[in-house]
Amino acid sequence: MHYRPTKRRKLTGHAATPAGIALGLCLVAVGVARSALGATAPFTLTSPDLPPGKPIPERFTANAFGCHGPNESPALKWSNPPAGTKSFAVTMFDPYRPPASGWWHWVVYDIPATATELPRKAGDTANPGMPASAKQAPPDGEAPEPHYYGPCPDEGDPPHHYTITLYALSVDHLDVPSTSTPANIDYVISTKTLAKSTIVRLFSRPKKTP
C-alpha cells in the first residue's frame, strides 16, 4: 500500500503578505486580552497600616490590662466585591485559647455596598470616618460601648494570630438586636456571606524579667 503525502495548503492573497500575518497576530493578541479581562478579579482585603510579615504596630494595641497603646483601629481597604453585594461586615478575632472560644476584638456591620475602605480610627467610640449606616458591636470583655479593642495578649504568650475578615453580604442590613454578642453577629454574618477575604497579623508581648 502506498501513502500519498498530504500537500500543505499555501497561503495566498492578503493572508500571505506581511500585513496579513501581522493582522492575524493582532487578532490573536486581542482574543488573549479579552480572555484576561473576562477573568474575575479576587475579592481582596488589604491594610496600609498592617504590612504582611510584620507584627501589629503598638499604635493599634489596647490601652488596658497592662497594655498602653492608643487603641486605634487600622485602616482597611478592599476591592472587587462579588456581584450582588449589598453590604459589608468586618470582624477581628483572636483564636488563641484561653478563653475557649477565642476573643472578639472588633465587629462592624451594615457597611454600605458603595464603601471601599474604613479609615484609621474608624473603630473609635466617636466613629470618625465610619459610614453613617454602619454599626459596631461591643468587643468581648468590655463595657457595652461598641468600639474597636486592640490586641493585648498576656505577657510571655506565643504570638497571637489576629484574624481580620471582610465579608461581602447579600443583604443591606443585618437583623440583629443591639444587645447581640459578637459571636451571635458573626453567626448571622455567616448565613448572608457571598464572599470573604482575610488577613492575619501577629502580636505578642515579651515577659518582663523580675
Image (tube, helix red, strand yellow):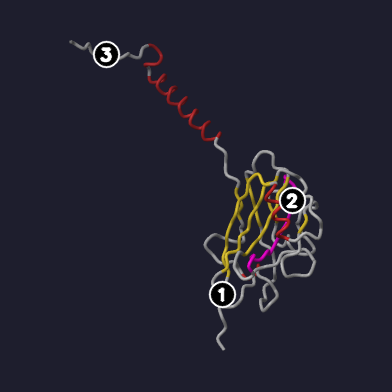
Magenta span of residues: 100-114
Q: Is residue 7 left or right of residue 138?
A: left
In the rendered structure, the answer to whether residue 30 lies left or right of residue 43 reads left
Q: Which residue position holds label 1?
A: 157
Q: How far apart are the alpha carbons under marks 1 and 3?
A: 76 Å
User: Which picture quadrant has residue 182?
Assistant: bottom right
Q: Which of marks 1 and 2 is nearer the N terminus?
A: 2
The magenta stretch spans residue 195: no
Which mark, by number, is residue 6? 3
Q: In which quarter of the image is residue 57?
A: bottom right
Task: Choose between 93 and 72: the one closer to the eye.
Answer: 93
Label 3 and label 2: CA atoms lie apart by 67 Å
Q: Where is residue 17 in the image (x, y as percent from the top left)?
A: 38, 17
Dot 1 or dot 3, earlier in sequence: 3
Residue type for callout 1: Asp
Q: How crowded is mark 1: few (under 14 residues within 10 Å), some or many (20 or more)?
A: few
